[in-house]
Image (cartoon, rainbow, N blue to C red):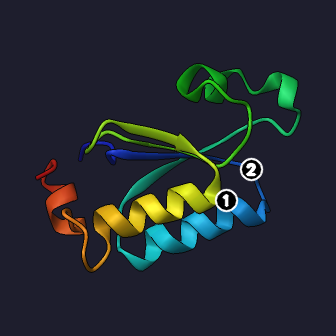
Amino acid sequence: MSEPAITLYRLQACPFCERVVRKLDEYGLAYRSRFVEPLHSKRDAVKRESGVRTVPVIVDDNTGVTMAESANIVSYLEGTYGKEGRLTAETAAAGGS
């Protein structure tokens, strides 16, 4: 089985991260969680990926999008995978559009 196309960088018990998780689950999207270090100064992996040390950060290989901020991520997921979105969980699982 291949890795999910979506990676979520997150912190344990982070309410902003959980908001994104709920949206991913709502749309039935497979994703890989990457838990980051609690200390900002230690978050090198997420910094390399997104240019920021804050979480959540999502990397969507289906569309080539990398973004931070939970509100932006939720809007992106709604617009991309929601009812009016151009992709569904099924097409995402199949490798994109």
Is 83 rendered above or below residue 32?
Answer: below
Q: Residue at x 55, y 74 (%)?
A: 22
Counting the numbered discs, the total is 2
Give residue 16's quadrant in the image.
bottom right
Using residue 25 as the reference point, say whether residue 12 is left or right of it: right
Is 3 rendered above or below residue 70?
Answer: above
Is 79 rendered above or below residue 62?
Answer: below
Picture coordinates of residue 7 (x, y %)?
Answer: 46, 44
- Circle 2 crowding by C-alpha within 10 Å: few under 14, some 14–19, many from 20: some
Q: Amino acid at mark 1?
A: Cys
Give the structural element (helix, strand or loop) at label 1. helix
**Which numbered disc flags the more N-terminal residue, 2 or 1?**
2
Give the structural element (helix, strand or loop) at label 2. loop
Nearest the viewer among 65 and 40 is: 65
In three-dimensional space, the C-alpha distance between marks 2 and 1, rounded to whole angstroms, equals: 7 Å
Judged by depth in the image, the label closer to the viewer, 2 or 1, is 1
Contact (CB < 8 A) between labels 2 and 1?
yes
Nearest the viewer among 65 and 27 is: 65
- The residue tagged 2 is 11
Give residue 18's quadrant in the image.
bottom right
Picture coordinates of residue 72 (x, y %)?
Answer: 55, 56
Q: Residue at x 52, y 42 (%)?
A: 67
Using residue 31 as the reference point, say whether residue 51 is left or right of it: right
Q: Which mark is residue 96?
A: none
Q: Amino acid at mark 2?
A: Leu
Q: Residue at x 42, y 58 (%)?
A: 76
Is 32 rendered above or below residue 29?
Answer: above
- Circle 1 crowding by C-alpha within 10 Å: few under 14, some 14–19, many from 20: many
Q: Residue at x 65, y 24 (%)?
A: 47
Picture coordinates of residue 68 (x, y %)?
Answer: 60, 44
- The residue tagged 1 is 17
Picture coordinates of residue 89 (x, y %)?
Answer: 25, 67
